[in-house]
Amino acid sequence: MRFRRRRAAMPAALGGFDGFARSIDVTKLDEAQFVRLIETLDMLGKAGTGIELSALRTETFVGIIAMASAAQLDALMEHTDLRGVVLNEIFARMSKHLHSERAAGLDAVLHWRFTGGCENGGYDRYQTVIADGRCTSGIVQDRDPRATVTLAPTDFLRVSTGITAAPLLFLRGRIKVKGDIPFAAGFVNYFDIPRPEEP
C-alpha cells in the first residue's frame, strides 16, 4: 500500500499557525529568545514551508509587536538581517491597509530615516508613496518628499502598528521631521491597521 503525502492539510495548518502564534506569550521570552522566535519564522518562510511572517494575519503580527518589550524590539532591530525583514513586513502591511477614502486624492511622498542603520550617515532609508489610491514603499528614494521623518526603528514599529501615538513621540523629541510636520504627524491616520487580537 502506498501512502500519500498529506499536503492537503496545509491550509488548515496555516490557520492553526495563526492561532499558535497568538498563543505565544512573548513577555516570557528574554531578548535573545524573542529574536530567535522571529529568526525561526523567517527561516521557515525562506525554506518555503508556508509558515512565515507574511502568512500571519495583521492582527496577530501587531499583537506580537504590542506584547514585545522595548528591549526585545531593540534587540530585534539590532539584528542585521531581521531588521530589514521586519521593516519590510511593516511596509508591506501598510500597503494592504491603506484607507482608500482618507487617502482619496492624496499624492504624497514620505521619506523615512531609521537610526542605527548601515546606510549612508548611519541610517536605513525608505520611501512611502501614496498616489492614485495606492501605497507603495521601498528602499529607493527617487521622489521629492513632502516630509522626511527620522526616528528609531523600535519607535517606528510601535507607531506604525498603533501601539504608540506619534504625537507623543514628537513631544518627547523622539521623532524629527523635516518638511510638512502636520502631514507627517497624521500620516498613520491614512491607514486602518487592525488592533491586536486577544490570545
Image (spheres, helix red, strand yellow):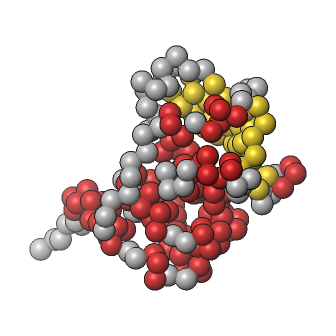
The vertical placement of 80 against 176, above or below, is below
Question: Which part of the image, by quadrant, shows the N terminus?
Answer: bottom left
Of all residues, the one furthest to the left in this rendering is 1
Q: Position of residue 128 (x, y in %)?
A: 63, 35
Taking the spot 48% from the left edge, 20% from the top edge, the residue there is: 104
Residue, x 33% and y 59% (percent of image)? 197
List the single residue furthest toward the right: 121
Q: Quadrant of residue 106?
A: top right
The spot of residue 59 in percent (x, y) is: 37, 54
| Residue 50 in view, yes or no | no
Residue at the (16%, 71%) spot, across then down: 2
Please state if 127 lies on the left or on the right of 134 as rendered. right
The image quarter in which residue 70 lies: bottom right
**Left or right, residue 190 beside residue 12:** right
On the image, the x and y values in percent for residue 169 come to: 65, 53
The quadrant of the image that shows the C terminus is bottom left
6 shown above or below 125:
below
How many marks the image carries: the answer is 0
Residue 81 in view here = yes
